[in-house]
Amino acid sequence: YALVLAFGLALIQGSLPLWGAARGDVGLMELARSTAVGQLLFLTVAFAALIHAFAVSDFSVVNVATNSHSSKPLVYKIAASWGSHEGSLVLWVWILALYGAGVALFGRNLPAPFRARVLAVQGLIGVGFLAFMLITSNPFLRLEMAPPDGQGFNPILQDLALAAHPPMLYAGYVGFSMAFPFAIAALIEGRVDASWAPWVRAWTLRAWCT
């Protein structure tokens, strides 16, 4: 349910604030901020639920049964939560939402219409990933009869450094996606000069440093 609610908020974030920015409606523009933060909260709940399912070896979840094993140490069970295709998508959209909420909460130096457009475009990116996840790669699909144990998981992730590699990689890789909403918002407003570059610089540097 948390993923569905996050998808709904992403739809709102990607539509109404754009309309509000075009009409100069402050209320609709402010929806971009609240929906971005709400999307992060729901995705945090979903990601935490997935990690918990792996941590307690809940083999009634298909993703856990096919990508974990009860005999593995807890740290590797947690790493297995993002070691699968479905789990990596959850990590991906969570980091995407984290950056969006960051702009919503700390981008107060941005003009309100520009910020609304940035967050709206970022919300549309989230819609795409969340729709793909819910339709083709749901990480919470259930088995009617849970197996007694799991099938194991990627041996490459059974190393502390490599287990930490995906979150670190995504923090930088997904973070660079924030440059795209800034560029699209600048194009919508006709900012064809470098006036918007200082606004995106901080977010790009954060992703690059990660």
Image (cartoon, rainbow, N blue to C red):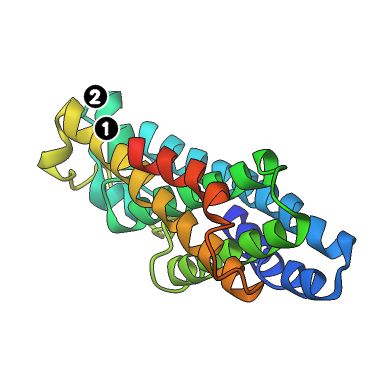
Question: Residue at coordinates 67% horizontally, 65% vertically from top-left?
Answer: 117
Closest to the observer, 204 or 124: 204
Q: Position of residue 118 (x, y in %)?
A: 62, 61
Residue 97 seen in this snapshot: no
| Mark 2 surroundings: few (<14), some (14-19) or many (≥20) residues within 10 A | few
Q: Quadrant of the C terminus?
A: top left
Tally the marks: 2
Residue 128 seen in this snapshot: yes
Tag in front: 1 or 2: 1
Q: Is residue 107 left or right of residue 17?
A: left
The residues bearing labels 1 and 2 have C-alpha atoms spaced at a distance of 15 Å
Vertical placement of 204 versus 8: above or below? above
Residue type at mark 2 is Pro
Q: Is residue 172 left or right of residue 37?
A: left
Q: Determine which of the numbered discs, if any, sits on residue 164 in the image.
A: 1
Question: Residue at coordinates 69% horizontally, 56% vertically from top-left?
Answer: 115
Element under disc 1: helix
Residue type at mark 1 is Ala
Quarter occupied by residue 21: bottom right
Vertical placement of 121 versus 91: above or below? below
Q: Which residue is mark 2?
A: 73
Q: Determine which of the numbered discs, if any, sits on residue 104 in the image.
A: none
